C-alpha cells in the first residue's frame, strides 16, 4: 500500500475523504474546509441531530463533491477537545472498519482534526498511521472467500508534515501484522522449523545475518533445559538468531529474546481441553520479536540489534520430560521440573545464558509466560520486570510514546525462596502465590551479567471471544524502545 502525507486538502484527489467531526463546538480547519465544499452538509447534519458525532460514530456521504472525493466519511470524536489514547484508538478502528467495507482504492484522512491529550501532532500522526494500517489487517489463507476480504485500499494519504512519524507508524503496523499472522497460524503450520524458515526469509529480504542452532548444536552447548521441553515432540527445536547491524562495527547489540513455544499442550502436566486451541499463541513472544525485526529493517535505524528465538513444541509422549526430572542448564545450574507446563522459562533460561556471548548492551525477553499475569493485569498492561531502574525507565518511556501499555511488577529477593528445591539448584515453579513474579525470579537467575527486563505478555498478546486472535503487541513498544536507543 502506498502511504504518503498531504499538507492541504484542496490539493488532494481521493476516492474517499475522512473527516473528524466533534459533537459540539467548532470544527477543525480541515473539517471546516470539507463542510464548506460540501455546501454546509456536515453542519446541517449535526445541527439536526441526524449525525450526533459521538465517539467512533460514522456516516458515509456519497457524491458530496466530485472535485475532491467521490464520498466523505464523517467520523465522530465526541464533545472533548482532546481524546484519550483509548478513545482515539476506538475512533481510528472505526475508520479502518468502514474503509475495509468500501470499494475505494485511494483514501485521504484529515488527521489534523484528531487531537490527543498530552501528545504532539507528530506523535498523533505516527499513531494514526499505525492504527489505521493495523485496522486493515486480515488473517488470510485458510478460507474460501479470503480474496474478497483483502483490503482494497492501494493508496492512503494522511494530513501532516512529518515523514519520519509517518514512516514509524507504517513500519510498526507492518511489523505488528507480521507478528499477528505468525501468532494466528495453526500449530500444524507454524512449527519451530517454520519459524526458522521465516528467519531465513527475513535474512534474505533485508540482508540480515541468520544462524540456526539445531538440537545437535544445542546439545553440544549444554542447553539441556531448552531441549527438555521438546523431548516429547516429533518437531525439532531450534535456537534462532537474527542480526541487524545498522550501528558501528563491533558495537555491542541490544537483544530481544522471544519465547517460541509453537504449541503448548502442557506436556505430561497436560492442560485442560477447553481453550487448548489457543496454545498456538504461546509463540507470540517470538512473533513480537519477528515483527519488531521487520519494523526495524524497514526503518533502518543506526543501531545494532540481535533477535533470538527459543523455539520448541511442548507435547506429551513416552519421550517427554516428566514432573520431578532434573536437568542441567547451559549455565551449569540444575533445575527440578515440578511442572512441565511451566516450560517457557525452561527454554528462555538457556537462551539467556547463550546471549552472554554477545556482551549485550541490554536484553529484553518477551513471553506469554504465566496465567498469573493475566489474573493480575488482565489484557490492558503487559507485566514488566527489570534488574535495574535504567532499563525499566526506558521501557516505560517507550510504552507511553507507543500507547502500548505495561506495568512494572516487583522482583524482590524475598520471592526467590519460593523456588528452593530439595534436589536441585532451583525448581521451575514457586507454588500458587505470585506466579508471575516467581517466573520472573527464575529467569533473573540467568541474567546477572547484563541489563535485563522481562515482559510477560500472556494477557496482552491475544484476544478471546468474538475478536479472537493475536494482537501484535508489544511490537509497537519494542520498536519504539529500540528507536529511542538511536536518539
Image: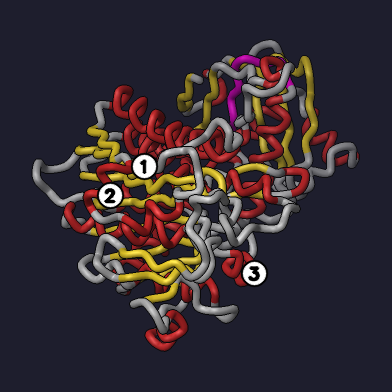
| Residue under the image location 20 percent in, 68 percent down | 449
For the residue pair 355 and 120, the one nearer the viewer reads as 355
Name the secondary structure under disc 2: helix
Q: Nearer the viewer, mark 3 or mark 1?
A: 1
Q: Is residue 58 left or right of residue 384?
A: right
- Which range is magenta? 102-111
In the picture provided, is 348 more to the left or to the right than 241?
A: right
Q: Which residue is mark 1?
A: 238
Q: Secondary structure at mark 1?
A: strand
- The residue located at (53%, 67%) in the rendering is 339
Residue 429 percent location from the top left of the image? 49, 73
In primary-sequence order, the first of circles 2 and 1 is 2
Residue with the mark numbered 2? 219
Query: Is disc 3 surrounded by few (<14), some (14 to 19) or many (20+) residues within 10 Å?
Result: few
Q: Earlier in the sequence, mark 3 or mark 1?
A: 1
Q: Quadrant of residue 29?
A: top right
Can residue 36 be seen in this snapshot?
A: no
User: Of residues 120 and 400, which is closer to you in this image?
Assistant: 400
Rendered residue at 63%/29% (across/down): 138
- Return the mark for residue 375: 3
Q: Nearer the viewer, mark 2 or mark 3?
A: 2
Q: Could you tell me residue 248's position as x and y percent?
A: 11, 43
Q: Position of residue 3 (x, y in %)?
A: 48, 24
Q: Say if the magenta span includes residue 110.
A: yes
Amino acid at each position: 500500500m502506498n502511504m504518503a502525507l498531504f499538507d492541504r486538502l484542496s490539493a488532494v484527489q481521493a476516492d474517499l475523504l475522512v473527516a473528524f467531526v466533534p459533537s459540539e463546538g467548532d470544527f477543525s480547519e480541515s473539517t471546516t474546509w470539507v463542510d464548506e465544499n460540501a455546501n454546509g452538509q456536515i453542519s446541517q447534519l449535526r445541527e439536526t441531530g441526524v449525525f450526533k458525532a459521538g465517539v467512533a460514530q460514522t456516516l458515509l456521504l456519497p457524491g458530496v463533491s466530485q472535485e475532491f472525493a467521490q464520498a466523505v466519511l464523517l467520523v465522530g470524536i465526541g464533545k472533548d477537545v482532546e481524546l484519550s489514547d483509548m478513545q482515539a484508538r476506538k475512533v481510528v478502528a472505526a475508520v479502518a472498519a468502514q474503509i475495509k467495507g468500501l470499494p475505494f482504492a485511494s483514501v485521504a484522512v484529515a488527521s489534523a482534526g484528531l487531537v490527543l491529550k498530552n501528545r504532539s501532532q507528530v506523535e498523533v500522526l505516527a499513531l494514526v498511521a499505525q492504527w489505521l494500517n493495523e485496522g486493515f489487517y486480515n488473517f488470510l489463507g485458510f478460507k474460501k472467500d479470503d480474496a474478497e476480504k483483502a483490503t482494497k485500499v492501494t493508496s492512503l494519504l494522511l494530513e501532516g508534515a512529518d515523514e519520519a512519524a509517518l514512516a514509524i507508524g507504517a513500519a510498526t503496523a507492518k511489523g505488528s501484522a507480521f507478528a499477528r499472522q505468525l501468532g494466528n497460524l495453526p500449530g500444524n503450520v507454524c512449527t519451530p522449523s517454520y519459524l526458522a524458515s521465516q528467519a531465513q526469509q527475513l535474512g534474505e529480504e533485508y540482508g540480515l545475518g541468520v544462524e540456526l542452532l539445531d538440537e545437535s548444536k544445542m546439545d553440544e552447548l549444554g542447553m539441556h533445559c531448552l531441549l527438555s521441553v521438546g523431548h516429547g515432540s516429533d518437531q525439532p527445536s531450534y535456537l534462532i538468531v537474527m542480526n541487524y547491524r545498522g550501528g558501528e562495527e563491533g558495537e555491542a547489540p541490544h537483544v530481544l529474546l522471544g519465547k517460541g513455544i509453537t504449541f503448548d499442550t502442557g506436556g505430561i502436566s497436560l492442560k485442560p481441553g477447553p481453550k487448548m486451541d489457543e496454545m498456538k499463541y504461546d509463540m507470540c513472544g517470538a512473533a513480537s520479536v519477528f515483527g519488531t525485526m521487520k519494523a526495524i529493517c524497514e526503518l533502518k535505524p543506526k543501531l545494532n540489534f540481535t533477535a533470538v528465538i527459543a523455539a520448541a513444541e511442548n507435547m506429551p509422549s513416552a519421550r517427554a520430560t516428566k514432573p520431578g526430572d532434573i536437568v542441567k542448564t547451559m549455565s551449569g545450574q540444575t533445575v527440578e521440573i515440578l511442572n512441565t507446563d511451566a516450560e517457557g522459562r525452561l527454554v528462555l533460561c538457556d537462551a539467556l545464558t547463550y546471549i552472554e556471548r554477545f556482551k549485550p548492551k541490554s536484553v529484553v525477553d518477551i513471553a506469554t509466560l504465566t496465567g498469573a499475569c493475566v489474573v493480575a493485569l488482565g489484557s490492558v498492561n503487559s507485566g514488566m520486570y527489570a534488574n535495574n531502574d535504567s532499563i525499566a525507565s526506558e521501557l516505560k518511556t517507550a510504552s507511553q510514546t507507543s500507547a502500548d501499555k505495561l506495568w512494572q511488577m516487583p522482583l524482590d529477593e524475598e520471592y526467590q525462596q519460593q523456588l528452593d528445591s530439595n534436589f536441585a539448584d532451583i525448581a521451575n515453579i514457586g507454588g500458587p502465590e505470585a506466579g508471575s513474579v516467581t517466573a520472573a525470579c527464575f529467569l533473573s537467575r540467568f541474567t546477572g551479567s547484563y541489563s535485563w527486563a522481562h515482559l510477560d505478555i500472556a494477557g496482552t498478546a491475544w484476544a478471546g471471544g468474538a475478536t479472537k486472535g493475536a494482537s501484535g503487541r508489544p511490537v509497537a513498544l519494542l520498536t519504539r524502545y529500540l528507536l529511542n536507543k538511536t536518539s
